[in-house]
Image (cartoon, rainbow, N blue to C red):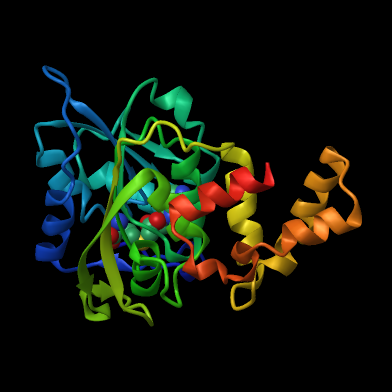
Amino acid sequence: MMEVRAKKALGQHFLTDQKVARAIVDALSCPVPTGRLFPVLEVGPGMGVLTQYLLEREDIDLKLIEIDSESVEYLLTHFAGMQGRLMEGDFLTLKLEKLFPEQFAIIGNFPYNISSQIFFKVLDYKDQIPQVVGMVQKEVAERIAEKPGSKTYGILSVLLQAWYDIEYLFTVGSGCFAPPPKVESAVIRLTRNSRTDLGCDEALFKTVVKTAFGQRRKMMRNPLKPLARAKAERSGWSEEQLADFLAQEVFSLRPERLSVEDFVALTNLLA
Ligand code: SAH
């Protein structure tokens, strides 16, 4: 069978550099429970440039999810042992808890148009996913790894850094792909930290972070006002008490200045 014809709508840029492919697979260092293969899910295998090296690893039990039927057909004809491993479908709607009753890792050259959604899904399953190794657009990799105070620090940086240690591993030039993407790429590794409890309400934390970054160049007082007002109503405060509450210094800061711990404190303030 011929090679898969690259489809732009599916974010298909096939990695052609074998050294890079091997380095990505080598970067996966998921903890292996004694005597058992560690379950790993590859997202978007395409023509299998990562898959070939993943299949060589004796410490992992590989599964694959690919949305493109042409790629699925290619993989079935070019690789042995795909039956029972390879699923045709959308990672974003995949019921991961049905597929993996316990822990599993994720690896992939992610389709760049849905990389943020992939990470939000990882967060939904954070207690089952000890590690993610992924290639993304360079800017996205930088943003996720960024520390507070930088201009690109944002929602995903805070939410992911709350639960994962982030490593920016290496940059990959567009010449390593066919067809070459317009942007540079980078490989990052997310390894689950030891946090089991945030010290605040998790759902409210997410809401506070997302709301605070709604106007990222402004003081947080404006975007957070509705959340403060909701608290005022719950607590039976007067308008004056609400104004005093919002006069606190933290509300004069821009969201990009706050660390994970600062957002935890802010969430408790608004709870
Ligand atoms: N891993 C391959 C392909 C990377 S391109 C390589 O390195 O060469 C991204 C791949 O993700 C494509 O194969 C594309 O078909 C697949 N893909 C896109 N959206 C997807 C989705 N929602 N779920 C699963 N796979 C998807």
Q: Left or right? Give the position of 260 relative to 39.
A: right
The structure residue drawn at horizontal position 60% and vertical position 43%, both measured from the top left corner, is 268
Instruction: Quadrant for residue 212, please give it.
Output: bottom right
Horizontal and vertical percent position of residue 64: 33, 40
Which quarter of the rendering shows the C terminus? top right
| Outermost residue toward the top in this view | 35
Q: Is residue 90 among what the camera can see?
A: no
**Quarter, ligand 1:** bottom left
Which quarter of the rendering shows the N terminus? bottom left
Above or below, 56 relative to 48: above
Above or below, 209 relative to 12: above
Instruction: Quadrant for residue 138, please give it.
Output: bottom left
Camera-side residue: 195 or 199? 199
Camera-side residue: 252 or 57? 252
Camera-side residue: 141 or 208? 208
Q: Left or right? Give the position of 107 relative to 59.
A: right
Horizontal and vertical percent position of residue 9: 52, 66
Above or below, 67 relative to 194: below
The structure residue drawn at horizontal position 36% and vertical position 77%, both measured from the top left corner, is 181
The structure residue drawn at horizontal position 17% and vertical position 22%, both measured from the top left corner, is 33
Q: Is residue 268 among what the camera can see?
A: yes
Q: Left or right? Give the position of 224 relative to 38.
A: right
Horizontal and vertical percent position of residue 219: 64, 73
Q: Left or right? Give the position of 262 relative to 40.
A: right
